[in-house]
Image: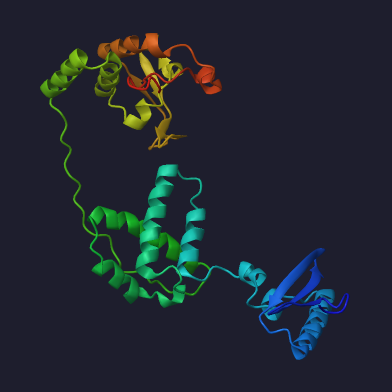
Amino acid sequence: MGREGNGVEMREKSIRVSFTLDGQRQRVTLDIPPTPANERYAEKLVVKVRQAITRGTFEWETFFPGSTQAKALQPAHSFGAWCDLWLDTKGRLAKKTLTQYRNALKVWKELLGADTPMEKLPHAVIAAAVGKTPWASAKLLNNYLICLRGVFALAGRSMDLGSPMEGIENSKHQAPQPDPLSPDEMELVLATMRKHQDLRAWAYFTFAFMTGMRPEELIELRWGDVDMHSGTVRVERARTAGEVKPLKTYNARDVDLVGRALEALATMKPWTTVGSDDKTDQELGRRIFENPVTGKA
């Protein structure tokens, strides 16, 4: 043990120094053996630290560059750290989108090395990683490149990285042509469903066919969104991965209801118009459609 009040503690295999900074007791372990000579060195170090604190010139990086405190104050340097920082800037996105971004960044960390310093990732290294990886599809690669460009754009505002992503273009991707059911196929599906399935399933798909609403919009549609007087529904919310979010277009819209859509709503009334203590259900009405197997929305 060091002398009382000198801020030096001799431990079994190291020396720990302590001092007060901004009213908080700070302790730092020095990776040196507890010899008499090292004890004197530690005592002198504590004196210099206290003097710097008094003058207002103390910096962790100067006195203890390898300490946890110094590392916490350093800007992100590795590729993995910048990936995590970029993801933090996207915290307001939907959970599903964040999950997709997180998966993409996991792949990039494996390909480029999470611990690799950013300046060690020039254009040639990135282009080689992109080129030699057997991507499942051009669309997947293009989606992953969104994240990679974002990471380097964010880091580039703080570091002199040049433009390592310049020239790394999206792969050409031809989206498959839509293949909708014909009117006869639609009628066959609905007729078969009405005959062999629960009426709630038939009502859901009938309403989907007659309105063209997206699945994530349908499952969040509530009775309070229905205007029977005008024969419309207001579409202004969606539910994806259990999370309510704004519409994909961020524009609410009114959808006109044809007779068969109104019939589907009438079918659902006995099941979902009443019977909930949920505050949101009381304010907006219960969700219209429910799972026939679970009896839940």
In this rendering, the answer to whether 159 lies above or below 285 is: below
Q: Residue at x 41, y 31 (%)?
A: 238
- Work out whether residue 154 can be spotted: no
Q: Is residue 25 left or right of residue 184?
A: right
Can you say which quadrant of the picture contains the C terminus? Answer: top left
**Residue most extreme to the bottom:** 37
Q: Is residue 177 left or right of residue 44?
A: left
In this rendering, the answer to whether 47 lies above or below 90 is: below
Marker count (numbered): 0
The percent coordinates of residue 48 (x first, y second) are 80, 82
The percent coordinates of residue 115 (x first, y second) are 46, 71
**Residue most extreme to the right:** 4
Q: Residue at x 30, y 13 (%)?
A: 264
In this rendering, the answer to whether 270 lies above or below 154 is: above
Q: Toward which corner of the image does residue 128 lie, by quadrant?
A: bottom left
Q: Is residue 22 left or right of residue 70?
A: right
The percent coordinates of residue 228 (x first, y second) are 39, 10
Q: Residue at x 18, y 50 (%)?
A: 174
Q: Nearer the viewer, residue 52 or 166?
A: 52
Can you say which quadrant of the picture contains the N terminus? Answer: bottom right
Q: Residue at x 16, y 41 (%)?
A: 177
Q: Toward which corner of the image does residue 254 lie, by quadrant?
A: top left
The percent coordinates of residue 108 (x first, y second) are 37, 63
Q: Nearer the viewer, residue 248 or 141?
A: 141
